[in-house]
Amino acid sequence: MCNYEQFVYNPLILSTVVIFNSILPAIDSPLACSSELDTGWSYALDVRTGDAIPNFWQGYSSSLPSNTGGYQSNATGTMYYAGGAAIYQDTGGQHHAPPIPLPPDISGGRETWVQIR
């Protein structure tokens, strides 16, 4: 039996970053003596380019490379942003709220119309 990554949760959009979680359902057998927990990954990508956000996941683990687009957080559900932290619950029921850095906002104006007066 195969285990396929699924994207079933709502994404979180902050500034120019889109954050989303995936789930890899556990393969449990009725013949096994124990059950497995689901696993999953969290991703953060630049909405303009699709690239990883440099140093985005450093608050989660300092051992991650600076250009990491995602990491195995085992997060379940949609992440929420409050007080400079991404709040989520993992598949084991633990709550987490590590700080996340946001890129500077993009400022600009309308480019599709001309003001006559």
Image (cartoon, grey):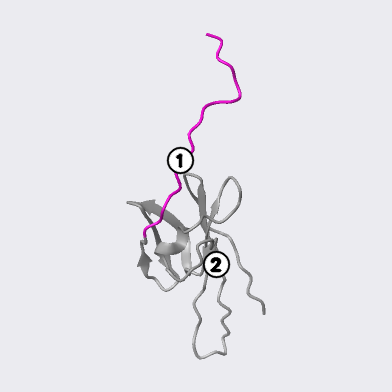
The kind of residue tagged 1 is: Asp
Q: Residues within 10 Å of mark 2 (few under 14, many from 20)?
A: many
Q: Secondary structure at mark 2?
A: loop
**Residue behind mark 1:** 105
Q: Residue furthest left?
A: 83
Q: Position of residue 36 (x, y in %)?
A: 51, 81
Residue at screen point 59% across, 25% down: 111
Of circles 1 and 2, the one toward us is 1
Residue at screen point 37% across, 58% down: 99
Displayed quadrant of residue 25? bottom right
Q: Position of residue 58 (x, y in %)?
A: 43, 63
Is residue 69 positioned above or below 92 on the image? above
Q: Residues within 10 Å of mark 1 (few under 14, many from 20)?
A: few
Give the prevailing secondary structure in the magenta stretch.
loop
Residue 23: mark: 2
Read off the magenta span. Answer: 99-117
